[in-house]
Amino acid sequence: MAERVDCPFSLKGKVAIVTGGGRGLGQALALGLAASGAAVAVVGRTRSALDATVERISATGGRALAVNADISDLQEIDRIAKEVSSAYGRIDVLVNNAAASAPLKPADEVTPEEWDAVMRINLRGTFFLTTRVAREMKTAGSGSIINISSITEEVAGPKASVYCASKGGLRQLTRTLAVEWARYGIRVNAVAPGYIRTELTGELQDNRELNDYVTSRTPMRRWAKPEEFVGAVVYLASDASSFQTGQTILVDGGWTAW
């Protein structure tokens, strides 16, 4: 009888947090992680959206928890980690998906308020949630942190200086924490999507000039679907990527290939 080989992509027994997990890309990632066996805590500001994600996971036999919190409020960071640890006893995976975008405008027209609104979530909130969750992972001696970045960490985005700056910062944060925390068994990687078709990007898709730019610039000639990023995140969350850290996986339909 052949010896059984366990699937290295299985997340059975693992606990994952997904920020911004109530809709769009975050919901797709939460569903994908749950389908791979993880218990998933979805974090976000809109309770009804979180509950909808939890219901979808529960309906398929998965385990899920809604944590209604705003990562831009540093006073709520500790509560997120405590609620998940209390419910499941551990935290194995953190997917930093929550993000803010700024209006498309020339850099010299950006206001301090617009700058702060983006950085408060994309860098400050993400950084402090990550460092708090890392305390749990250090105790366990393992963990996987996955930052949802953007192709704008690699290439320029027209009239998107603030957003590009935040994602460029996230890239360096990914690399720095990977080096700093490797000795604790914590891996830190990123997934950088191209343009994604979700309910939240409807306004961008309706902008004919931008839509034409995206489809013409992407070799696959279309926007991505949220479900198309699940594979990369499950890979990074699982033992299949046990020797990968400090890296960014670009999932962009070929955008950065030319």
Image (cartoon, rainbow, N blue to C red):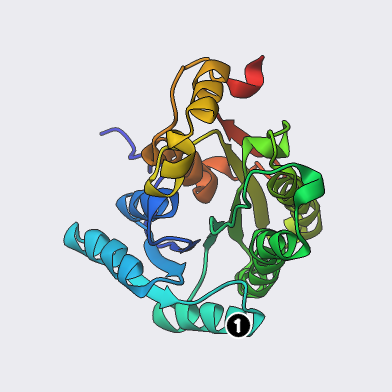
How far across and down, in percent of the image, does residue 226 sit? Answer: 40, 41
What residue is drawn where x is 54% and y is 45%?
236
Residue 34, quarter of picture = bottom left
Q: Residue furthest front?
A: 109
Against 226, residue 255 (above or below) is above
Q: Is residue 45 visible?
A: yes
Indicate the amino acid at tag 1: Asp
* Residue indicated by mark 1: 78
Residue 122 lies left or right of residue 198; in this view the side is right
Placement of the C terminus among the 4 image quadrants: top right
What residue is drawn where x is 69% and y is 60%?
114
Against 115, residue 244 (above or below) is above
Q: Residues within 10 Å of mark 1 (few under 14, many from 20)?
A: some
What residue is drawn where x is 53% and y is 15%?
219
Residue 168 lies left or right of residue 211; in this view the side is right
How far across and down, in percent of the image, does residue 180 sit? Answer: 81, 58
What residue is drawn where x is 41% and y is 38%?
197
As helix, strand or loop, the secondary structure at mark 1 comes to helix
Residue 128, quarter of picture = bottom right
Q: Is residue 64 visible?
A: no
Against 165, residue 139 (above or below) is below
Residue 113 lies left or right of residue 45; in this view the side is right
Choose between 182 and 21: the one closer to the eye. Answer: 21
Choose between 89 and 189: the one closer to the eye. Answer: 189
